[in-house]
Image (cartoon, rainbow, N blue to C red):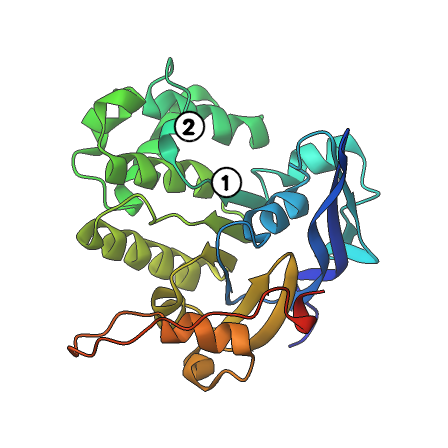
């Protein structure tokens, strides 16, 4: 790898509560080029909090610290609010897990994409922004983009809503896209279509992609590299094609839980309570 697009070193996310401090992300480090990086792990492992911390979206009372958190040479921890506003949605975008909670219910799909575009292309006129929005809806393989443009979020299916979210996040042509379980609420057919769209757009635009998921089989076939997280830590990093050769007991346990077509009834593997490597 030459100069990394994203450089993360010793990233920590803490929530200071009345009952004590919870450390959701504990010392995560990695570098990302213009490639597909998968982050996998069970619910609560810190995957989504890692993605939100990169964008500066950790909600209060959260605290984010790191030895280094830089995007294309820009220190995200010391950058001004103005710089962060320009980066968010401009050069770095994030597709949230469920479009029902991410899209504004009182604005049409088209208006939301136009708003995202004009927030970063301030000199763009409304006509240009409308053409851009329609082009993005077409790019994500939306049938009849003109009709969908005028619909409200409750009038579209889950798959259409997810494609609309992807269109809105990519309309500014970001350099980095963080996709937080973008296919978890979709059926298999729609999931494959969304993945094809992401694959085409990442390849054509040369973006970096962080693909957050709990589906190891999906990540192993779609991503270039994989980070495996457990209890806020990265316990293993390897090439996606070598995921079945993982050495860490947690990764091996996850792989062993994948369903097979064989009719072999066997107990699922379990971890010892509080294993030493999780401390």
Q: Is residue 196 left or right of residue 70?
A: left
Res 135 visible:
no
Point out residue 70 in the picture as x, y percentages from the top left corner: 75, 55
- Distance from Cα at disc 2 to Cα at disc 1: 21 Å
Closest to the observer: 30 or 110?
A: 30
Res 165 visible:
yes
Element class at badge 1: loop
Q: Which residue is mark 2?
A: 101
Element class at badge 2: helix
x 51%, y 43%: residue: 94
- Of badges 2 and 1, the one in the foreground is 2
At label 1, counting other C-alpha atoms closer than 10 Å, the crowd grade (few under 14, some 14-19, many 20 or more) is many
x 17%, y 79%: residue: 262
Among the 4 quarters of the image, the one containing residue 19: top right
x 74%, y 30%: residue: 61
Point out residue 66 in the picture as x, y percentages from the top left corner: 80, 54
Closest to the observer: 131 or 224?
A: 224
* Disc sitting over residue 172 in the figure: 1
Task: State whether residue 78 is above or below residue 272.
Answer: above
Q: Earlier in the sequence, mark 2 or mark 1?
A: 2
Task: State whether residue 181 is above or below residue 161.
Answer: below
């Amino acid at each position: 790898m030459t100069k990394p697009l994203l450089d993360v070193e010793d990233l920590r996310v803490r929530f200071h509560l009345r009952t004590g401090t919870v450390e959701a992300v504990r010392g995560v480090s990695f570098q990302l080029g213009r490639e597909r990086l998968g982050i996998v792990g069970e619910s609560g492992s810190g995957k989504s909090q890692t993605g939100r911390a990169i964008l500066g979206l950790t909600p209060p009372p959260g605290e984010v610290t790191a030895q280094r958190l830089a995007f294309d040479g820009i220190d995200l921890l010391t950058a001004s609010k103005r710089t962060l506003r320009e980066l968010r949605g401009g050069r770095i975008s994030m597709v949230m897990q469920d479009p029902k909670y991410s899209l504004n219910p009182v604005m049409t799909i088209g208006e939301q994409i136009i708003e995202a575009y004009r927030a970063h292309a301030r000199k763009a006129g409304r006509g240009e922004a409308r053409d851009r929005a329609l082009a993005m809806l077409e790019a994500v393989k939306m049938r009849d983009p003109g009709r969908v443009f005028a619909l409200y979020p409750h009038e579209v299916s889950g798959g259409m809503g997810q494609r609309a979210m992807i269109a809105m996040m990519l309309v500014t042509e970001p350099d980095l896209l963080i996709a937080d379980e973008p296919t978890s609420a979709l059926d298999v057919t729609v999931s494959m279509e969304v993945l094809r769209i992401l694959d085409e757009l990442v390849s054509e635009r040369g973006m970096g992609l962080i693909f957050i998921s709990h589906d190891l089989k999906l990540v192993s076939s779609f991503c270039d590299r994989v980070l495996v997280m457990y209890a806020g830590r990265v316990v293993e990093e390897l090439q996606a094609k070598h995921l079945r050769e993982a050495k860490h007991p947690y990764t091996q346990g996850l792989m062993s839980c994948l369903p097979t077509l064989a009719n072999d009834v066997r107990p699922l593997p379990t971890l010892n309570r509080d294993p030493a490597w999780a401390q």
